[in-house]
Structures are given as structure tokens and as C-alpha cells.
Image (tube, rainbow, N blue to C red):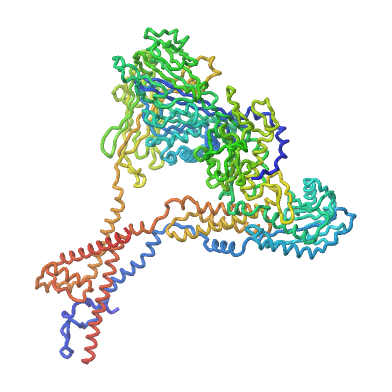
Amino acid sequence: MELPSRWVFLLFLFLSSTKAFGSEVDKEEFQEELLLKPLPDRKVLAHFHFETRAPPCNSNGRHHHHLFPKSISQMVEKFRVKEMELSFTQGRWNYERWGGFDTMSSNNAKPPGVELWAVFDVPKEQVDASWKNLTHTLSGIFCASINFLESSSMYSAPDWSFRQASGSLRYGMLPREAVCTENLTPWLKLLPCRDKAGISSLMDRPSIYTSLYYSQRLHLTSIASDLEGLNSGIALEQTLTVVLHPSSQRTGLTHFSQSYLQPSWSLSSIFGRKVNGRCVLAKSSKVYLQLERGLVSQLKKSENYGADYIASEGYDGEANFELSVNPDRVIKEENSRNGISSSLLYEFSVDKYSNSKPFDLGLTWKFPVIWSCQQAPLHASRFLMGSGNERGAIAILLKSTDLNDSSPVANSAMDGCELRVNIFQVVPWYIRVYYHSLQLFVDDQLKAVGAFVEKIHVMPSKDKISPGMMEMVLKLPCGVKSAALTLDFDKGFLHIDEYPPDANQGFDIPSAAIGFPDFHTSMLFPSNESERKSPMLSKFQESSPVLLYTEVLLVPLTTPDFSMPYNVITITCTVFALYFGSLLNVLRQRVGEKEKLKSKAAAKTGRLSDLLSRLSAKLRGRSQEPMQSPSESSPLINSKLALKVLLMAALAVAWQYYFG
Amino acid sequence: MAEEISESPNDPPPETPPSPPSEPEFDSKTMRKTKPGLKRLFLTFTVLVSFLLGFPFLFKSVEIYRSPLPFHDIDILSNDVVSNPFLFPCHFQAIFVPSDPKSSSIDVNLDELELSIRSKITKLASKGIGSQCGACTNNFTLSLTLDHGDCTQSLSKFYKCGSIRAVGLDFSDDESVDEALESAGLDFGGKVYSVVVVVNGKGVEGVKVVVGKYRHAWIVGREWEVEEVAERLAEIFVKVFVNGGREEGLIHGEFMPVGADGRIVLSFNLLNADPRDWIYDWDFQKIDETLLAPMIDALGPIANISVESQVLYYTPKFTFSSWDEKLGGYTLSTKDLPFFVNSNEWHLDTSIAAGGRSKILQFVVYVPSAKECPLLLQLPNGEISKTNAFISPMWGGVMVWNPQSCSRDSDSELLVRHIMSPRGSWQSGQHLSSKFLLDLQKVSEVFAGQFRQLFGLKSGSLHVGAVDTYSLLASEKGFTEWELDFLSRQHTCFNIHSSTTTLGSLSKLVQSLPRMIIMDEIGKQVKFSLEAANLARSNASLGFYGASAVSSRQARSLAEDAFFHPSIMSVSYYSFEHCFAVYSPFFLPVSMHVLLAALREWRRYKQEKAKYLLWKAKEKVAS
């Protein structure tokens, strides 16, 4: 370990070139945020949002990192990913109870299993190769079987229904992927503080994995700074959305209203942990508590909560609920629409908390309050019809949600407007969908499809090559009560080695995505907040179309007996062998001798002894003539058969004994 | 054939027409009069033979595709490599120059000296120094020149007489001498190692031996024995120029930190053990551009090197350190070092940018947390390591970097992110302490030293010889020309050995698994690998070190590619058991029938023939 006394010579080089880097280095930044939201059905939504940004760098290639995860940046650079989203989800988002018409549901409600889509910045013919490499890389990074999306029968290339990306978008889903901690740990590894400090330290594995809904998402965008897109910055957005069921803290009380009261909770009661200060590397570290519109309007109605009060003070100990920590700021959503009440955000900054004084936000309800959340224009569900292992039908049912007058659909229903619905569905090839059998029922009446379809794009499946994909835009009248689409299909047969290990469980058809391009969700916050804006809030401000996912379907396919091929081989071979053997025997039969045998049939002995003598005679190669043959050819064949069977059995036993 | 005419040759004898009375008594049980027929025998044997003939066709039809591999060439190459080791040519020359042209002539007997040097070189080589793989002590030329002004005794074909005398030498400044000698064109296009012996040098006490950055060294001294000169020359030639000046037993030559595909990824990591105490950051871009780029360039023939860096946080070390009052710091003894690297928390991550078989060398700067702040590495002799760093062969190096003052500066509201920079300014920029100046400088020096050590070279600047100590001049590229030559030779040799063993194992594997599919691509890779290996060998024998290193690298990477080809790795071979299981249900019973039928017919034919012969004999006797 001797210090080489060299390398002093380059000092002068640095003295000349030290102007810029002080500020350059700082540009990689990280922000952490947590949003908590009480849900109408006594649940609590926790939404973690981490954002890491890498600035565009001016050197060719990015190799040096300060906060930004090296692996992600290398991946983006290697595969020229323009935009990508990967989500791991467990459970299903309950659109009726947890909301279907807000930014949370349309951005963070994901189909069960793994969903991956990516847009590449490469020539069109290289997109597939990039996608394949990307899936392998991601499966290595996240310890998941994302590499199954590599085969062309597992992914599709939607044109316009999913998002606009001329040909360089690939989309794949693995509905059956089990999500667990082994996927969370590598995801956390991308954060500079991992779960050692800051808000992410709340992620107590047992509590988040017993949640009703768990969705872990990674979204990255490369922001091209020049035309070639070579020097691009990367924005990495990692979110974790969980819906937790807080156990009521005051079960001992027997007050009647207790059963109607929303459960009170605190961070330590739902996660079992507290926040011990911020992640020191984060530029900002904030916790928000959101009260959604429905809740705020309910609170307004109750007399001890003045509307002005919310706006001015925001927080009140006398109100319906009590917070254990005073918020630093209250942000009121600017709602231009109809003057209905707008949602409220209480902001808590974690900066001032530390190990000795941990942050533990608690919410205690004082009076029962019942509210409902905003629904998407239509509620979508998908199911299977038909029975048997041969054919069936997929049905997508769109039902109008229970509309109140605040809904935009009902408002515009009067003037004969139209409601546009995007449907994007990918079906694996072994479900052979007959697209000509598409039927549309509007308000339970069969209607001509052409009258309602504005645009349709169908890509029929090719066996073992590509899945079937259907993109369509439906134009429904606004007052529609229900609309149903049905598609007939035949079940295909898979090759024996294409069956998964648990083939009898059935096969999953990935969720369909239903979008409402005319409806956008966004929350507007006062514009003077712009300089202090957090990435999560600016994400909420972005207008995003309402999107919802349907259920995953489970289709039982005929599963073969997996030992069948060998059985077939064995029986065919045995038949052939028998045929061949008897043919050979017939060829070398001597008719004269047989007749002589017939004539000699005089002295009758027992069948068994006869058989034995024959056997011995055979073994001695017919050195002596058979004594008698009491009957005709049938015992002869019998004895031969018996001999064969015996021989085969002996061989089988020997084989089993020595090699089995 | 006779049996064609006999319609019922197998008819039992009783049915044969009654014999004429003159004939001997006829026992129908043991005799027959007609020749036994051959029809059924022929039939069964035809079936048997056709079966036997069919087997090759069957085997052919179930045969799997195997690209023909040049097994013979592989054997030849591996035998060749074993039986005649590499013969790199080396040219040594020693030039004797009087320091003062007008002074008295040097009375050296060059022939005697040459013999002496030769014998000493062979003696050193026989001791095992400089005779390892990639050395050139068994194939060297030696020429001595006396540059006397009139160039009478010039024997060297490489040295242009008078070129040293043309440049003025000032021996108090080694760097300038080095440059001057280089400009004199001593190394003849990179092939000759020369030692300039300056007799009666001015301004030098005793004897001074310096090895330059290029391919020459010089000895300046006042007076000496001839034997001593020979000793020194032999040592410089063998230990320095041939053997790279490395210490024995440091890192064995087999541990080449170069990936199988000839690439190295240098991954630099700055670990902040606890960012709550302090956060250090660095501007690695500058180190990369200014310090590492020339080094990477210089190592170009040996490996393709890429650099990446990251900063990690919350990365405690694995072992506990103990407070040492005397040293004023937390110490960690050498025996704890294997447990220093905390693979759970230090996610140094393999690089996505690197290919599958690249070698990743991790260089780690560990900034300890406040509660273990001056963290010192203690050598076995109780001293503190000067560099506070250690290497792990084939993995990389770790350096512990202690902040200037170990008191945490969390008094301030927001933690300042300190930037380790070559200029040494804190990010806040107010205090430019001169102590902090050499910060990143020191780090990169340690990195360079560790990198050299990982390659098996010395990290110091002194070489202790038998007679006296030589000083080695450092190159700004990190590696001097003669060190690069040494590395090229060593790597060529290692790569060729490695590729031959890989190819040898591949051919063994392929021959031992006759039912394994071998793709055409593998065949091609093997062929190209062999070609590259042969090219490397021929280049080596001509003395093109760089070119031979490049093609040997190619040979190795192709051989590894062939060996680790995915089609070999996957379960692509169709086992014999499988084949047996599929075909035995048919062939076992059928072959039973065929064999038994043939056997029976044969027996019967023999029996009947015996009967017939017996009858024939009887008839003969009777007649």
C-alpha cells in the first residue's frame, strides 16, 4: 500500500477548468412526498411519490452519477428509451368506492400483475429488438419474470388508443405475476436513501403487503434537450400506492355513533412506523393529507364547519376531525367548474422532525361523515360467457354510474351530446377471437356496430406469433344507461411444452383499458404556488384522460394429459410390433406341419401342461415335435402372446431394476 | 438355388413318397430324402439383414446437427503452446558514453563484458526471475556499443553512432535526461531496450541508476568495476525491462483483471456511510477526462476500458472498528479487511452498460460516519497505512477517506454537500483550505496505484536491486512504455493459454457428448479463435507486442464466446435415454421376433440338413 508519489503533474489542468462544475453537479435532484387520503369506505390511501431527476449532460454519454440510479440511466442510454412505465400491482382498484374520476385513479390504478409499456427513440425496425433487451434488463433489475414479455406473442403495439406514439410504443402485461418484497427491494434501491431514512422508511413490509391494493410504479421520461436526443435528461418517477385498512383505535367505546364513525388512524397505526426525519438528500420532503371534494362538501354542510373557515384557516380543532400535527400550509384546489366544493390539501413538511421528535400524523374523526367519491362517466366490467372447453364469448359491459347532477355527463346529456369511449384490449393468441362477431348492445338492445363505432383498429392474432389486439372508439349517446360489447372466441390448443406448470388453473386474459378521451382530470392549485410546487402536485395538475382497467379474465383451456405423447408412442409401437411379429410368423409357417399337428390331436392333456411343453419346446428351438395341440390356432396364439407378454414383463422388470 | 424347385421341402419325411424297396430302411424321424428347403431361412435372414442394414439409416435420421469442429487444429495448437512456449524476441543494448567527449577514452573490453552480462542474464533466468510466461530472456540479443566519438567499436545495428553525444545531458534532472534520450531515438521504433552507461558523470555522487518512462535507463557513476557494471546491466534488463519491475509474490500472473471479452469496466463508487453526518460528493467527470483518459488510452492494446461512477449513501461497513487512544482514531486491523466490504448495503451493482463477460473492477472511496470518524487501517506491524487503502485482487480496491475534521457540521440548518474536487473548494466556497487542496488528487493517486497493483505492477517509484536502488520515473499515462510492453507480453501469453485451454475443454466436452447440438456459429467462432491465436503467435515471434496482445485478446474472447454459447448452455442436447425410451417400444419386440425366427429357422435347417445327410450316407452305403 505505498502511495505512489506521482500524478502531481496534472494539477495545473484543473486550475484552469474549475468554473462550471460546482453548479453542474447539483442538478441531480431528488424529492420525496407522501399523500394520505381517507377513502369513503373507511380505508386510507397512501401514495408515495419519489422523483429523481438527472439533468441533460453535455458530455457524450452519461457515466457519472450523484443521486440518480446508475442502472436506470444506463438502461435508458443503452436502449434509447424515451418513456417507460412499469407497474407491479396486487389487488384491484375499487373504482366505485375509491374513485374513478381523479388523477389518482387514472394514473395510479393499474391492472393486477405487471404492466409495462415503453416508447423507444430508435428506428421502427429496431423497436422490437430494443423491447426484448429492455424486458430482460428490467427482469434482472426487478427480480421479476418480465422477460416473458420478450416473446412476440406477449406484447402488442397499440397505435392510438393507449397513447399517441407513432409505432415506437410497445405494451405488454403479465396478469399472473406475483408481486412481493423481492420486487420492492430493488425498486427501493433506486432511491438514494433507500428505506433507511425519510418517508420511505414508513414502508413496513408486513403492513404494506397486507393492504387491499398495492401498486408499485416506475415511470421514466427522458427529456431531450437537443434535436438528436443524445443529451437527454431523465426524470424518474417512482410511486407506491397502497390502500390500507386502519383498525379502529377506540374499539372499547360503546357509543352508538361509533359504528358509523370513520376509523381514526395515525401513521404509526397504519404502518407501524413513524417518520424519523427526512432523507437528507431530498430537496424537499413533504407529507400531504388530501380531503377530496365529496368529503369537503359534506363537511361544509355540517354546521360547525364554515366554508370561509376552510379557505382562510383551513384547520380547526373544533371541526369534524382532529389532526395530531398542525399543518404547515393548506392548499385549496382552484375549481373553476360549477362552483362545487374543491378538495383540500394539508401540507406537512418533514424537515423539522428528527429521530428524537418523529413525525406521526394522526387523524381522529369526531362526528360521523359519509361521502362518496367521484365516479368515472361509465363503469366498466368484463366477463366471460358460454361454457365448455370449446368456445365462449368475452363481454365488456359499460354501465353508467349513478349520476348526480354534478356529473358532467348528466349536464350535457340534454343537448344530445356524444360520449366517446376508447377500448383497448389485448387477447392472447390461444383465445381466437372472431372479430366479425362483434355485437353491440346499447341500453339492452342490439344495435348496428357501425352506428356507434367512430374508429376501430383490429389486429387479429397469429398463432404463436402475435396476440390479437383491438382498439376502438365508441361514440355513445350521453344518456346511455348501459352498453355491452360481445366477441365470440374459440379456444385454441397449445403445444405441449407451452403449458405453464399449473395449466389446470386456467389462462389469464389481461385487463382491457377503457379510456374516456373527452374527460380529463386535473387539479388546479393557486398559481402563486408555482415556485414551491412539488412534483406530485404538478403531476396532479397535468391534465390526464380518465382511464380505467377492467378485470382480468380467467379462461380454462383443455389441458392434456401430459404423459400422453409417450403413451401414444408406446401403444403405436406395440401395435406395430405385434403386426410385424405375426406377419413374420405367418410367413414362416408350414402348412403341412400344422395339419400334422391337427391330425395328431389325440391324447388330450391339460391345457397348462400342454402350454408348458410348448414353451419348453420353443425354448429348445423345436428340437422335438410338440406333443399335442388340443385345439386349433387360438391356443397357439395364446401361448405366443403369453410368451411375449412374459418376455416384455421380464424386460420391463429388468429395465426398472437396473435403470429405473 | 436348389430350394426354389422344391415346392414343399419342409414337408415332413413321412409324406415323402415311399422309397424303392432296394433302399435301406428309412427312419422318418431322423432322416429325410429331400434337401431341406432354404426359402423360409432366406426369408427370415433377409428380414434380419434388412433390419441390421436399416439401423444406420435410422441413426442417420435421428442424428442432430453438429457443426464440424477443427479438433485436430485445436490439438495441434494446444500441443504447440505446451511444447514450445512463447519466444518473444528482446533486443538489449548498452551504450557506453564518456560524459566529457574530450576526456580520456573508456577502456572497456566489450567482448568480455558481453559474455559476463550474458551469463548473468541466464543465471537470473534460471532462478526463475524473468522466465515466467511472456518473458523473453530465452530469446534475446545483446549488443554493446562504445560511443567514443569516432564510433569505432559500434556493434549495435540499432544505435546510430553519436546520437547521444549530440544531445546535451544534465544528470541532475532526470526528466530532462529521459526526454533527451528519447529524442535521441534509442528505442529504434519500440523494439530495443537500452541502457546508457555514462562514465565519469558530472555532479553525481556514487552511482545513480534511473529507469526512464520509455524504453531506456541510464547509469551514471564515477568509477566502478566491470563486474559491477555487468551485474547492474543484467539486473536492469531482466528484472526491470523483462519482468516489469514487479515484486515477487504480489499478484500472480494468472489473475488478470481483464474480462473474457477483453473489456474492463472501472466502476468508481463514493460511499457515504451515514449522510446524516456529512455528505461528500465529487466531480468525477473531471477525473475521468484528465486523469483516467490517458491511462485508458495507454492500456488500449491490453483491454478495452470504460469508466463509470456513482455516489451511494447509507452504506455502513461490515466490521467494527476499535478506538485507539494512541493513534487518535478508530483502527481496523488487516485481518478484518476481508469483512470490510458490506455486500448487503453496498449495492455497487454490476453495470448494464458492460457486456456479459466484462470484468468489473470496483474502486470504492469510503467516507466513514461521524461515530467512527478518523478510521485508520492498521498494518500487521502496528503502523498506520499511509494510503488508508487496500486492494482485493480481481475485485478492486477500497480506500477510506476521512473528512478533515471529524466533528459533524450539522449545526447548520441544511447540510452542505461537500464536493471533493481537485481544486479542493467546499461547495460553500468560503474557505479554501490549502490542506484540502490535494484531496481528489490523493484519491486519484491511490486509484492509480491500486490499478497498477491489480495489474501486478509496483505502485512505488523505487526498485531495490541487488547492488543498489534504482529510481523509476513515472509516466503521466500511469504506465511507462516498458511496463506496457511487459503487460502486453504477459497478457498475450496468458490469453493464448487461456484460449487454448478453453478450446481444449470445448473439444473435450463436444466429444464427450455425442448427442449435443453444435451450431454453425460455434464452429465459426472456434475457427476464428484459432486463426487469431495463430496470428498472435506469429506477431509475438516478430516482436509486435501490441498487435499480438490485440489478437490474443480476440482469440480468447472468441474461444469464450464459443464455449459459453447459449445453445450449449441450454438444455439443447437430446439424451440417449430419451432416444431409447422413444424407440424401444417398437424395436425391442420386433427385434425379438426377428431374432427368434432367424434362430429357429437356422436350427431347423441344420437339423433337417443333418437328417438329409444321414439319409444320403445311408443311401451311399446301400448303393
Comparing A281 with B228, the one in front is: B228
In the rendered image, the quadrant that contains the C terminus of chain B is bottom left
Question: Residue A252: horizontal and vertical position, in percent?
Answer: 31, 19
Q: Residue furthest right?
A: B102
Quadrant housing residue A369: top left
Quadrant housing residue A614: bottom left
Q: Residue at x 55, y 62 (%)?
A: B73
In the rendered image, the quadrant that contains the N terminus of chain B is bottom left
B137 displayed left or right of A644? right
How many marks are shown on the rendered structure?
0
A563 displayed left or right of B436? left
Question: Residue A70: horizontal and vertical position, in percent?
Answer: 54, 36
Question: Image height check: is A158 above or below A602?
Answer: above
A449 displayed left or right of A332? left
Q: Residue at x 38, y 42 (%)?
A: A463
Q: Is residue A639 visible?
A: yes
Q: Is residue A122 visible?
A: no
Quadrant housing residue B78: bottom right
Comparing B199 with B382, the one in front is: B382
Question: Residue A522: horizontal and vertical position, in percent?
Answer: 46, 19
Question: Residue A606: horizontal and vertical position, in percent?
Answer: 11, 68
Question: Image height check: is B98 above or below B365?
Answer: below
Q: Residue at x 25, y 62 (%)?
A: A648
Question: Image height check: is A139 above or below B199?
Answer: above
A438 displayed left or right of A169? left
Q: Residue furthest left?
A: A603
